[in-house]
Every structure is written in structure tokens, then in C-alpha cells.
Image (tube, grey):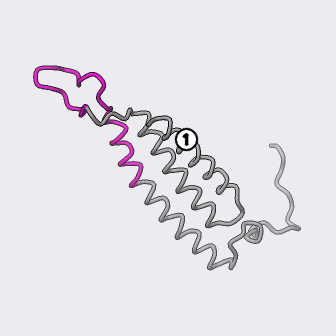
């Protein structure tokens, strides 16, 4: 199962990198969403996938049973899902407002803030 998930993680991360290198804002935002899902899946896979043994400490012992899944990555993923959803919704609103103001989805046509005839910034200080 880990091999299949490793392939899926690689697919997610490569698709996210491809989409984030695009010039269209909506593709960039989809790349950010896919990247977050790929990283969440990576953390989940690193925490071991064992459905047979629950991560509960038996009475009278100080450690969980051998071979049990680590519950910490699962808790981290739940938090990351909430934060990722909030970030994606913020980025979608930001992209929509940029589209409304500049009437463009392409980043090359959004360069109103950087006029062509403006002086270049200094190369060093």
C-alpha cells in the first residue's frame, strides 16, 4: 500500500509543480491545492498505515502495542486540512479581486505595477 501511495504522492507533487509554473492564476491556485493534498498524503504515509492495531495504550503499560499507527501525523493532517482550506479560500478571493481590478488572468498582462519605462531597482546596496 505504501508503494501505491508513494506513486500517488509523486503524481500529486509533480502535477502541483507543473500547475504552479503556469501563467494563469487559476492554475496556480489549483497547484497550491494539489500541493497541500500531496503533502498531507505524505505525512499520513510516513505515520505508518496499519489498520489492524489501534494506537491505544493498554491498561498497565506505558507504550502502545508494537506495530500500531502513530496518531500524531493524523492530528497534524486534520489541522493542515483546515489551514489549507482557509488558505485556498483566501487565495481564491485574492485571485478573483485581482481579475476584477486588472481584467486579466495571465500574469504577464497583470504587470501594471511594473511599468516598462520605470527605472530598474539597484543590484546591490
Magenta stretch, main secondary structure, is loop
Q: Quadrant of the N terminus?
A: top left
Q: Nearer the viewer, residue 50 or 87?
A: 50
Residue 90: x percent and y percent?
49, 64
- In percent of the image, x 48 and y 50: which residue is there? 37
Q: Magenta residues, as a range?
A: 53-82
Rendered residue at 43%/60% (across/down): 86
In the rendered image, the vertical position of residue 104 relative to residue 124, given as above or below: below
Mark 1, residues whose alpha carbon is within 10 Å: few (<14), some, or many (≥20)?
few
Would you name the residue on which mark 1 appears?
A: 7
- Residue at x 58%, y 42% (from the top left corner): 10
**Residue 54 at x, y percent in the picture:** 24, 34
Residue 120, position as x, y percentages in the image = 85, 57
Image height of 66 relative to 83, above or below: above
Query: Residue 88 vs residue 116: left or right?
Result: left
Q: Find residue 43 and report its horizontal and vertical position in percent.
A: 44, 39
Amino acid at each position: 500500500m505504501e508503494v501505491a501511495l508513494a506513486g500517488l504522492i509523486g503524481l500529486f507533487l509533480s502535477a502541483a509543480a507543473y500547475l504552479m509554473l503556469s501563467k494563469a492564476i487559476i492554475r496556480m491556485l489549483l497547484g497550491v491545492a494539489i500541493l497541500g493534498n500531496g503533502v498531507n498524503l505524505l505525512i499520513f504515509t510516513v505515520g505508518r498505515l496499519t489498520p489492524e492495531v489501534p494506537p491505544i495504550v493498554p491498561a498497565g503499560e506505558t507504550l502502545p502495542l508494537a506495530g500500531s499507527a502513530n496518531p500524531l501525523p493524523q492530528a497534524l493532517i486534520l489541522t493542515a486540512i483546515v489551514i489549507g482550506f482557509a488558505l485556498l479560500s483566501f487565495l481564491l478571493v485574492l485571485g478573483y479581486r485581482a481579475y476584477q481590478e486588472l481584467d486579466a488572468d495571465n500574469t504577464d498582462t497583470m504587470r501594471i505595477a511594473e511599468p516598462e519605462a520605470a527605472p530598474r531597482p539597484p543590484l546591490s546596496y
